[in-house]
């Protein structure tokens, strides 16, 4: 390469650096680094990967382990024994009270803030039809915007438009939880559970629910028509459609610590119909670490990648020590020769 | 034409000199049956000479002389080019998808489908348009050449070619091309003949004589045309080059016209000052244009295989679409009714879901692959064009890739079919050596010997000396005469057997090999003859006679030369010119010729002065291919009559007198030497005739000459036979058909790269073999098979017999080939055109082709352009190998178009080959670099690029499918529309283009040092199905890792400290980030050479994604939708997002990384080894040995080419030296050593 460059310099008067670079480009002789995977590089690379991923995995595992999470599935338990054979009838019957109490034992000290989630399983919020069934402009600007065809079939009722329209809003989750520790009710903070940007930019401050859940067929929860949409954080959270059929959504936060062995009584109003499609409902109390909730997957994956890298590097090191790599001859010529002989024999 | 009157004086009636070719056949109107066809259908053309205005209106309106080779014009461009584009399956699919996307079915924004399609098709069409524009410019260049045309009143003015009309009278000067098919009216010669070079039409290098009709002979100057009127009735335009039927009505007399009166477009006027002609066929009607075929659009092998890959991806697409739609239907039937929150009323039918899935998974089909490949190929072509190593300073031309879609095919060539004249050779003869009276002059050591002996560390002279001992050296009185040069060489020889190289011996006798000759056509250096030193030789008479034969026995004429009293000559063949020049250099200057006298300025050794001598030309027995000799009978000033003869050695040797054979033995030795060096040799002989004998013969000959009828030629030959006997041999002269610069080296490289080279030439067998030797395609220890029809069956014309004959010969070759012990002998096949025609018939070709392919080199001589094309097609089809055809003339057009890659040599003036070619080179020697460096690179680049494309689209496309499984196959997309639209266009396109344009496995010097690397392309190891499947699996794996790692990390738990959970927008952005990082890091593992451009593109692409995400998120949510604040608010602050990206990238790349690590460590490919060597050599010095060994290995198995010859000679010399050591010592004492110096070695086969 050096040769080429110097020759180039001779044949082309070098006016400037740009000129030279241009020449090198057209002659395909730009200075370049050509990394070659020598054994040393291979071993070092794998070793390095191990050195990075094992600690990283351990740290993430540690973070995940520190998270205290209490999960309680209540969909079946909250249906009285008598109705368990026909849960759908139970949930659809508006006359039967839906209250139910769950007792959660705190097995480890939980530091505030403690997040309260509800989790739905086998609920396809990500269905194409469902995801599309809302109107962003209406959510932000209210009635002024009339084209709500995407909201079908929940776009209007009795000739009046619905705000917020669409299936997502219509199927709003409406179980409620009251948490009691000892004798006092735990304060559940239900503010700030949605993304700030959503509150500020996607849901209008002056848009109020209108004509909502007034149809013959009521879906989920109702909204207070006096509160603007930007403050209806339940709705906002619900309308952030989940990616997978099993999802959690933030219900609120407890702003005080829970001690180990505390018993928290949760009074659930079991309104939401998951029974007709066999969905599950869970209540989750969880602290967070710097990485978020409890999930060992990442930590395990990192550690296993790291340790297998170390293993591979060791194998290579051994192979390399045992038989230092010989300089090989180019195979082609030999391959070609053999082939020729075969051809000749034929 | 002020000079015309002066030139008229020099007019010679050639027909008087010529005995065979130039006689005027007694044509009468009724004698030729074809004349009666005139006026019939097919023979209805009427041309009014000198009245072109009559051809402006019907019914005599003929096309203008404008020739177009473009594919499109302004009107047809759009429909035609669009049609071409949508012939590609993938494009059609995308068109369909784009149409469907405007309906409700679409899963995403129609713009994201239509925009890339428009872009892709637009780029491809622009490329087509640009290429066609270049063709148009080239046409324009040809069409705007000028010629002198008659405008009335005897006034000739310059007119462009395209402005010519049928009926125009034009004047063409020497060395100009004919602008269209002309009827020859008259020429600067009195008898209306002219010489024409038809190399561009049929590839034959000898000049052809054309002659005008007798009726128009008097139209000899410009003025004569002022009132010239005539009507020509002739055949309609047709492509037959050798026929022409017509007659000329002049002053109410009808004269018949024969093919000899027709001057064809693309041929050139030679040796004739000017001609007048009338345009008969113009533009598209000309025979040359009618012969040309539209160049077929070629596609490279890789591209064709790529189609299969696309089909594979299509079936994958269909499969997952089917799964999706079936899954959807099943869900719908069984469960979804229960899902009240969807309140399903309308049942989406299965079919709509299927179509939607087809559009959705369209990312599996890499739409941008085509456009990226187009862009990359254009850039590659640009870089090839810009390569300064492929720039010819002499012609100021560089390589031109005319169709850029064959770049990678250049890396897979296995067969090269090459034309000879103009491609390998310059069509210029050089006088190189001669053997006079049994002594060889002009140096006797060739390059091969020198290289071989250098390798043996043995002095050439000493080796020669040892060789000669075993031969019966020619006895000669010469041995006591030494020129200075001899003595110095002599000393070296005496100095011992094993001298280390000693440059002092490379004296005048050797040096002639190098350097450009000072005089064109004369590359001879020998102090014993030069500067009149020949006058000190013994047997001076023979030497003088030798030079006289050279100066007299020819048909050339002197033309004004430069100063220094040196003349230039023109003759029918370039050999004659070189002889004349040589004679002039030796002091025998032929300076004037009149009708019957030849004037010579001779150096008289007795007086030491130059004297003028006149030789009366009595008879000329001209050269023809049957006779293979030419004689001239002259009488000198003393009245002595001599017959001077030159001809092929065997012919001359047969006709020697008993006392004329004194030098035959020595001369034979020299002949074989010359032949091995690839020189064309002619033997010279003379005979002294006594007056009585001559007169007797002359009467016979004159009678024969005046005979009319078909047997005339035979009678003439018989008559000549009578006098051409009892000759006395003088010696031989060797001329070199000068090879173009760098041809042997280039062939050597190509051979080492594993390519087979077939020589296809229109020339005769001997010439072809000479060139074979000169280019090292042949060597002495090769077994040559000559496949030639024997005389009997050839004349009997019985097809069956000929077939049998060929089959018998083939069988014989097979037997010889399969014989034990012949296995390692390289084979060479020499086929003659006629035999080839039979051998290529369907029932014989099964035997012929395998044999031919097995031979190290194949030489086809006397092949017509059509046969060239046929051979090319058959070789291509039967062997399935990639063939490259290279040629320079119009006769190579068929071959160039037929081959997988056609290369035209643009150095010559004729543009036909270049126009038909895919790539044009200024010189043959550039082919080596073009293939071995650029071909190799392009092949690797394109194949790597396609594989990577497949990978990245699978890695991305399948994540869409996996997500469908989680959405109950409803057709929901995980990503924002914009992410998807940007994927192929911006986020992954630039790195792959940089891969396609700048990737180099090894640098160009290394490529040239190890031509064997090229075999990677021939074996196509970078685009095998196992590799393709491997990359598909890698893509599947990557998509799985990316998708699963993301959904397991982010669901269902919170991903941030504040407890927020990820929704569909976050998961989409995160997964997409992982994809972008993974595919861009993957390409950094593929690339082996990083310049700042690659770094910028790869890391820049990743960076741009983040930048995009940030700014996209900053837009109002109405525009950014899912991307709103996704990075700034949700993902950016979450550490898990960054950790997952790192993890996913590493895990997704791990399988590939492991694969390359294992491959490099345990099963390295050649390029890996070389890369490593080059890498290690940086620090250490002792790897040079390695380097050399590798290089030797790479040369080892080659059978043709310079290196192979040196090799063979090296082996041979070694053997000989061992055998002869003892003998030498004995002979040194017993014989005069210097004898060896006067003879050259004989190669024993």
Image (spheres, rainbow, N blue to C red):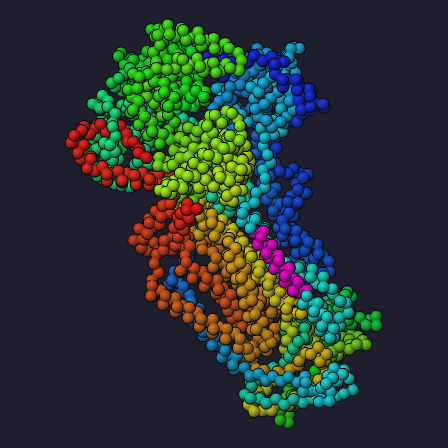
Q: Residue at x 37, y 37 (%)?
A: B782
Q: Position of residue A137 (x, y in %)?
A: 72, 67
Which residue occupies the foreground of this view, B1184 or B1154? B1154
Q: Position of residue A272 (x, y in %)?
A: 71, 81
Which residue occupies the foreground of this view, A16 or B852? B852
The quarter holding residue B34 reads top right
Task: Locate residue B963 relative to residue B685 in the image: left or right.
Answer: right
Relative to B331, residue B570 above or below: above
Task: Locate residue B368 relative to residue B577 in the image: left or right.
Answer: right
Q: Residue furthest left?
A: B1229
Q: Specify the segment rendered in magenta.
A: B306-325
Relative to B486, residue B743 above or below: below
Relative to B173, residue A172 above or below: below
Q: Position of residue B579 (x, y in %)?
A: 38, 21
Magenta stretch: includes residue A167: no
Which residue occupies the foreground of this view, B803 or B106? B803
Q: Position of residue B1203 (x, y in %)?
A: 35, 40
Q: Residue at x 28, y 38 (%)?
A: B1213
Most prominent secondary structure in the magenta stretch? helix
Number of marks drawn: 0
Q: Residue at x 37, y 29 (%)?
A: B679
Task: Inspect this view and state whether residue B363 appears.
Answer: no
Task: Locate residue B843 relative to residue B65 in the image: left or right.
Answer: left
Q: Residue furthest right?
A: A158
Magenta stretch: includes residue B317: yes
Task: Inspect this view and state whether residue B1234 appears.
Answer: yes
Which residue occupies the foreground of this view, B502 or B302? B302
């Amino acid at each position: 390469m050096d040769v080429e460059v110097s020759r180039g310099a001779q044949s082309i008067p070098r006016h400037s650096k740009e000129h030279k670079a241009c020449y090198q480009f057209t002659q395909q002789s730009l200075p370049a680094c050509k990394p070659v995977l020598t054994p040393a590089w291979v071993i070092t690379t794998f070793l390095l990967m191990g050195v990075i991923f094992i600690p990283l995995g351990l740290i993430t595992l540690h973070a995940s382990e520190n998270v205290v999470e209490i999960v309680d599935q209540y969909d079946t338990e909250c249906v009285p024994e008598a109705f368990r054979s026909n849960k759908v009838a139970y949930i659809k019957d508006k006359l039967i009270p839906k209250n139910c109490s769950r007792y959660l034992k705190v097995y480890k000290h939980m530091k505030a803030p403690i997040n309260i989630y509800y989790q739905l399983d086998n609920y396809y919020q990500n269905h194409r039809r469902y995801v599309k069934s809302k109107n962003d402009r209406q959510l932000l600007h209210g009635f002024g915007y009339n084209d709500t065809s995407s909201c079908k079939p929940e776009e209007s009722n009795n000739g009046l438009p619905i705000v917020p329209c669409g299936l997502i809003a219509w199927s709003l989750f409406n179980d409620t939880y009251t948490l009691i520790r000892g004798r006092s009710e735990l304060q559940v903070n239900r503010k700030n559970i949605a993304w700030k940007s959503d509150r500020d930019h996607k849901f209008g401050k002056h848009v109020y629910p209108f004509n909502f859940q007034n149809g013959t067929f009521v879906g989920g929860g109702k909204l207070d028509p006096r509160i603007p949409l930007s403050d209806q954080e339940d709705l906002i959270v619900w309308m952030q459609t989940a990616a997978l059929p099993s999802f959690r959504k933030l219900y609120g936060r407890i702003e005080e610590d829970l001690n180990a062995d505390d018993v928290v009584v949760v009074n659930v109003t079991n309104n939401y119909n998951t029974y007709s499609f066999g969905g599950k409902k869970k209540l989750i109390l969880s602290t967070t670490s710097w990485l978020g909730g409890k999930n060992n997957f990442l930590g395990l994956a990192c550690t296993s990648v790291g340790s297998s890298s170390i293993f591979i590097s060791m194998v290579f090191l051994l192979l390399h020590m045992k038989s230092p790599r010989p300089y090989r001859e180019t195979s082609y010529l030999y391959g070609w020769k053999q082939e020729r002989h075969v051809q000749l024999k034929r | 034409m002020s000079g015309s009157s002066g030139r008229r004086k020099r007019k010679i009636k050639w027909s008087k000199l010529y005995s065979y070719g130039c006689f005027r056949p007694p044509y009468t109107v009724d004698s030729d049956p074809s004349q009666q066809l005139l006026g019939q259908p097919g023979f209805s053309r009427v041309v009014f000479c000198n009245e072109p205005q009559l051809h402006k209106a019907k019914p005599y309106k003929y096309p203008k002389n404008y020739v177009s080779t473009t594919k499109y014009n302004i009107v047809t461009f759009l429909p035609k080019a669009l049609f071409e584009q949508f012939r590609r399956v993938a494009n059609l699919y995308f068109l369909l998808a784009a149409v469907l996307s405007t309906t409700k079915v679409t899963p995403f924004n129609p713009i994201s489908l239509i925009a890339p399609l428009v872009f892709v098709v637009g780029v491809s069409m622009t490329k087509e348009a640009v290429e066609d524009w270049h063709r148009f410019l080239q046409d324009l260049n040809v069409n705007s050449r000028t010629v002198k045309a008659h405008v009335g009143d005897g006034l000739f003015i310059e007119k462009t070619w395209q402005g010519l009309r049928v009926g125009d009278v034009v004047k063409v000067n020497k060395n100009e091309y004919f602008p269209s098919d002309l009827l020859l009216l008259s020429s600067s010669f009195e008898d209306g003949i002219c010489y024409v070079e038809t190399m561009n039409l049929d590839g034959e290098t000898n000049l052809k004589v054309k002659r005008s009709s007798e009726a128009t002979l008097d139209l000899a100057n410009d003025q004569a045309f002022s009132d010239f009127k005539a009507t020509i009735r002739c055949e309609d335009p047709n492509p037959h080059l050798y026929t022409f039927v017509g007659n000329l009505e002049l002053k109410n007399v009808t004269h018949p016209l024969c093919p000899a009166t027709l001057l064809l477009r693309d041929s050139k006027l030679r040796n004739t000052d000017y001609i007048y002609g009338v345009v008969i066929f113009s533009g598209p009607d000309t025979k040359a244009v009618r012969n040309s075929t539209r160049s077929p659009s070629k596609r490279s092998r890789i591209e064709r295989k790529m189609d299969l890959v696309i089909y594979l991806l299509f079936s994958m697409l269909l499969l997952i679409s089917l799964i999706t739609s079936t899954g959807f239907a099943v869900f719908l039937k069984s469960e979804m009714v229960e899902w009240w929150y969807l309140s399903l009323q309308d049942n989406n039918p299965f079919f709509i879901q299927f179509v939607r899935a087809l559009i959705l998974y369209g990312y599996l089909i890499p739409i941008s692959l085509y456009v990226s490949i187009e862009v990359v190929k254009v850039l590659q072509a640009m870089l090839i064009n810009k390569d300064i190593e492929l720039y010819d300073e002499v012609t100021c031309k560089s390589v031109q890739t005319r169709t850029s879609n064959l770049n990678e095919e250049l890396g897979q060539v296995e067969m090269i079919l090459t034309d000879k004249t103009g491609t390998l050779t310059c069509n210029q003869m050089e006088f190189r050596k001669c053997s006079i009276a049994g002594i060889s002059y002009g140096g006797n050591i060739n390059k091969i010997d020198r290289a071989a002996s250098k390798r043996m560390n043995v002095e050439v002279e000493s080796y020669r000396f040892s060789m000669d001992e075993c031969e019966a050296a020619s006895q000669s009185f010469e041995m006591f005469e030494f020129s200075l040069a001899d003595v110095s060489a002599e000393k070296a020889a005496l100095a011992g057997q094993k001298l280390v190289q000693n440059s002092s011996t490379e004296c005048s006798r050797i040096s002639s090999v190098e350097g450009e000759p000072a005089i064109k056509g004369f590359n001879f250096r020998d102090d014993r003859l030069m500067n009149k030193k020949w006058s000190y030789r013994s047997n001076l008479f023979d030497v003088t006679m030798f030079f006289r034969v050279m100066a007299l026995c020819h048909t050339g004429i002197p033309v004004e030369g430069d100063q220094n009293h040196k003349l230039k000559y023109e003759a029918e063949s370039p050999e004659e010119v070189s002889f004349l020049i040589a004679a002039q250099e030796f002091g025998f200057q032929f300076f004037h010729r009149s009708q019957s006298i030849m004037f010579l300025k001779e150096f008289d050794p007795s007086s030491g002065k130059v004297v003028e001598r006149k030789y009366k030309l009595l008879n000329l027995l001209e050269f023809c291919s049957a006779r293979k000799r030419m004689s001239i009978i002259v009488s000198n000033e003393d009245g002595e009559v001599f017959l001077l003869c030159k001809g092929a050695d065997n012919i001359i040797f047969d006709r020697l007198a008993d006392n004329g054979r004194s030098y035959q033995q020595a001369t034979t030795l020299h002949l074989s030497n010359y032949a091995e060096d690839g020189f064309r040799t002619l033997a010279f002989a003379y005979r002294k005739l006594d007056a009585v004998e001559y007169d007797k013969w002359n009467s016979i000959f004159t009678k024969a000459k005046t005979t009319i009828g078909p047997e005339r030629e035979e009678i003439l030959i018989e008559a000549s036979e009578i006098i051409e006997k009892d000759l006395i041999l003088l010696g031989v002269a060797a001329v070199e058909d000068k090879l173009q610069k760098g041809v042997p080296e280039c062939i050597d490289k190509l051979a080492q790269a594993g390519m087979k080279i077939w020589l296809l030439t229109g020339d005769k067998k001997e010439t072809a073999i000479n060139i074979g030797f000169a280019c090292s395609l042949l060597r002495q220890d090769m077994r040559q098979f000559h496949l030639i029809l024997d005389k009997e069956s050839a004349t009997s014309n019985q097809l069956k017999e000929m077939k049998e004959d060929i089959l018998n010969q083939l069988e014989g070759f097979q037997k010889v080939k399969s014989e034990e012990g012949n296995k390692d002998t390289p084979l060479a096949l020499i086929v003659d055109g006629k035999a080839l025609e039979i051998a290529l018939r369907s029932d014989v070709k099964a035997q012929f082709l395998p044999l031919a392919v097995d031979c190290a080199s194949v030489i086809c001589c006397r092949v017509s352009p059509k046969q060239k094309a046929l051979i090319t097609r058959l070789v291509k089809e039967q062997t399935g190998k990639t063939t490259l055809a290279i040629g320079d003339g119009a006769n190579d057009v068929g071959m160039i178009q037929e081959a997988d890659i056609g290369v035209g040599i643009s150095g010559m003036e004729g543009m036909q080959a270049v126009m038909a070619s895919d790539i044009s080179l200024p010189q043959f020697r550039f082919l080596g670099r073009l293939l071995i460096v650029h071909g190799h690179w392009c092949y690797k680049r394109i194949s790597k690029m396609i594989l990577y494309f497949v990978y990245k689209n699978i890695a991305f496309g399948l994540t869409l499918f996996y997500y469908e499984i989680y959405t109950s196959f409803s057709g929901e997309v995980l990503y924002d529309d914009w992410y998807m639209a940007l994927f192929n266009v911006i986020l992954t396109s630039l790195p792959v283009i940089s891969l396609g344009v700048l990737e180099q496995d090894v640098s160009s010097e290394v490529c040239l040092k190890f031509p064997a690397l090229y075999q990677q392309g021939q074996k196509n190891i970078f685009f095998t199905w196992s590799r393709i499947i491997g990359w598909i699996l890698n893509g599947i794996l990557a998509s799985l890792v990316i998708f699963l790692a993301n959904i397991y990390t982010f669901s269902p738990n919170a991903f941030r400290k504040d407890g927020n959970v990820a929704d569909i927008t976050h998961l989409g952005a995160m997964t997409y980030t992982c994809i972008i990082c993974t595919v861009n890091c993957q390409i950094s593992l593929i690339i082996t050479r990083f310049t700042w451009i690659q770094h910028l593109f790869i890391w820049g692409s990743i960076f741009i994604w983040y930048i995009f995400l940030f700014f996209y998120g900053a837009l109002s949510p109405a525009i950014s939708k899912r991307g709103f604040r996704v990075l700034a608010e949700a993902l950016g602050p979450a550490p898990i997002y960054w950790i997952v990206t790192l993890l996913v990238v590493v895990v997704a790349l791990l399988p590939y990384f492991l694969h390359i690590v294992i491959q490099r460590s345990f099963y390295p490919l050649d390029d890996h080894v070389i890369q490593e060597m080059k890498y290690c050599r940086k620090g250490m010095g002792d790897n040079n040995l390695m380097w050399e060994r590798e290089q030797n290995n790479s040369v080892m198995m080659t059978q043709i080419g310079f290196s192979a010859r040196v090799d063979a000679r090296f082996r041979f010399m070694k053997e000989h030296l061992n055998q002869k050591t003892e003998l030498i010592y004995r002979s040194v004492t017993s014989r005069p050593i210097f004898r060896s110096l006067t003879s050259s070695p004989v190669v024993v086969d």
